[in-house]
Image (tube, helix red, strand yellow):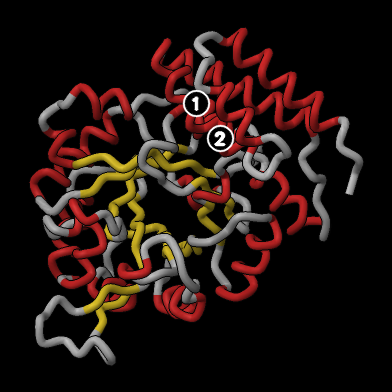
Amino acid sequence: MATNFWLQLKHPILALAPMEGVTDSAFRLLCRRRGADVVYTEFMAAEAITHGAKSVLAKMRFVAEERPVVCQIFGKSPEAFATAAKTIEDLGFDGIDLNFGCPARKVVSHGAGVALLRDPQYARRLVEAALERITIPLSIKVRTSIRKESKDADPGNPERYTALQLIEAIKGLPVHAIMVHGRGYEQGHSGDIDTDMIRQVKAAFPGIVLANGGITTPAGTADMLDRTGADGVGIARGAWGQPWIFRQSRELLSTGRFIPANPDDVVSAIIEHAKLLNELKGAYGLLEFRKHFGYYVTGFPGAAQWRRQAVTVSTIADVTKLANAIGNQLKEIPPA
């Protein structure tokens, strides 16, 4: 029987939430080194894993330093979930996460992701299928709710399916954790967070509950925990360009204050991230790094200029030179 790593994590748990195109091995490692307690992969199509798709298998690469690392899958075929789950365990992941929360239209239109909230019993079948083949811990990612799919639904007072109905449906199954994105499907990635629903999930679910959505600062981490009573948080977009948010959040929760990132922190993260991507993906990794670079300089004086220069980098030396120039400029800015 595999070790249930969830039981060994210090509370509150600070997790790097799964993000397509972002939480590859390089970014996961960057965040683990800066305080994330557990990291999630990008989401993988269960069917693609069963077919041995090279592009998906490449996304499943990880290194020991990332542990504990959880692999997330999506889809709607019980057979594919079972096979993919076994593959994930065989590859050595510490846990598997089932995505019942993705709002992407192409996913929802196929009845996967958050659309599975509309059929909690079918979602249970998917959980059971995965559990039959694994001994590693299983978790779930979900959104708070989705509107009833019906032309007759009243737009002013629509019937909604919620995470609570899913919790009821999976009762009795050994699901170890659930991450709740505090927005409904129709909200996408904007709008208010339904902290009351997350609190209700915490009261109804016997395992670990992670609150997710809209956390962009250490204070946001503390506020989310206070308002939901969750066992931890899943930080997603809030880690873009500031992977140190995990360390800062732990400092704030432990001592009531945190050390702000300084120019050296920014420079070292930029260079380290570029090197990790280069090691993971070669020359293409540096091309991909250009999009990440923009997050690191957001809000800085001259950010637009730095982004224009970033599209020309093609070597680690280029990145290092640019990062040091940014650091020198930041050091000239008087403290607030």
Q: Which residue is mark 1?
A: 290
Snapshot quadrant of residue 178:
bottom left
Of residues 146 and 254, the one drawn nearer to the viewer in this rendering: 146
Of residues 182 and 137, the one drawn nearer to the viewer in this rendering: 182
Residue plotted at (23% across, 25% down): 55
Q: Is residue 333 above or below residue 228?
A: above
**CA neighbours of label 2 inside 10 A, class few (<14), some (14 to 19), many (20+):** some
The amino acid type of the residue labelled 2 equals Gly
Is 333 left, or right, of 60 in this rendering? right
Q: Quadrant of the N terminus?
A: top left
Structural distance between the alpha carbons of marks 1 and 2: 7 Å
Question: Residue 163 at x, y = what percent?
Answer: 33, 73
Residue plotted at (72% across, 48% down): 248
Residue plotted at (23% across, 73% down): 169
The amino acid type of the residue labelled 1 equals Arg
Looking at the rendered structure, which numbered label has been put on residue 3? none
Question: Residue 180 at x, y = what percent?
Answer: 42, 64
- The mark tally for this picture is 2
Question: Residue 205 at x, y = what percent?
Answer: 40, 72
Q: Is residue 321 above or below residue 219?
A: above
Is 138 left, or right, of 223 in this rendering? left
> Are dots 1 and 2 in contact, CB under 8 Å?
yes
Question: Residue 204 at x, y = what percent?
Answer: 40, 78
Looking at the rendered structure, which numbered label has been put on residue 294? 2
